Image (spheres, helix red, strand yellow):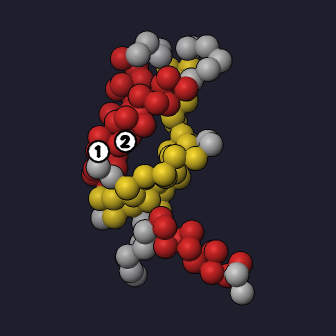
């Protein structure tokens, strides 16, 4: 099953700045080869369900290895069975309606 997720991994107990932890998670996402797009409060990732969930797990593992005693993660996800649709197509569909 193909899935698009919006992932926000927040390490707790590491201080105010979490950019190093976010960067480590981004490296794992990049290494996965999955299509992704980082934004100000998370990352959209798309691909086969098991591969996407594996990279989410890997993000947790790496952030814990960096010393975060706790992590809270927010994830929204969507799947479709009626047709294929990428993240870019979803965004373009809205832009097309804004242009009319």
User: Which SS class for mark 2?
Assistant: helix
Residue density around tag 2, few if under 14, some if 14–19, many if 20 or more, within 10 Å: many
Which residue is rendered at x = 48% and y = 51% of the image? 37
User: How many labels were placed on the picture?
Assistant: 2
Picture coordinates of residue 44 (x, y %)?
49, 52
Tell which of 22 and 5 is nearer to you.
22
Which residue is rendered at x = 47% and y = 16% of the image? 68
Left or right: 90 as drawn, with respect to 85: right
Picture coordinates of residue 4 (x, y %)?
44, 59
Q: How far apart are marks 1 and 2 (CA)?
A: 5 Å
User: Which SS class for mark 1?
Assistant: helix
Which residue is rendered at x = 55% and y = 26% of the image? 19
User: As drawn, which residue projects farthest toward the bottom?
Assistant: 100
Picture coordinates of residue 60 (x, y %)?
40, 29
Left or right: 58 as drawn, with respect to 89: left
Answer with the quarter of the image where residue 46 lies: bottom left
Look at the picture and state if 77 lies above or below 1.
above
Left or right: 64 as drawn, with respect to 7: left
Q: Residue 29 carries which label?
A: 2
Look at the picture and state if 66 lies above or below 4.
above
Look at the picture and state if 89 lies above or below 12.
below
Answer with the quarter of the image where residue 1 lies: bottom left
| Residue 67 visible here | yes
Residue picked out by circle 1: 32
Rendered-image quadrant of the C terminus: bottom right
Marks 2 and 1: in contact by CB < 8 Å? yes
| Residue 57 visible here | no
Which residue is rendered at x = 34% and y = 64% of the image? 2
Left or right: 89 as drawn, with respect to 49: right
């Amino acid at each position: 099953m193909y899935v698009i997720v919006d992932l926000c991994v927040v390490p707790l107990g590491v201080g105010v700045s979490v950019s190093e932890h976010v960067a480590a998670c981004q490296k794992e996402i990049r290494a996965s080869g999955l299509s992704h797009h980082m934004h100000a409060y998370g990352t959209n990732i798309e691909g086969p369900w098991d591969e996407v969930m594996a990279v989410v797990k890997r993000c947790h593992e790496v952030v814990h290895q960096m010393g975060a005693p706790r992590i809270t993660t927010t994830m929204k996800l969507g799947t479709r069975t009626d047709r294929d649709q990428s993240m870019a197509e979803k965004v373009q569909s809205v832009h097309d309606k804004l242009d009319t």
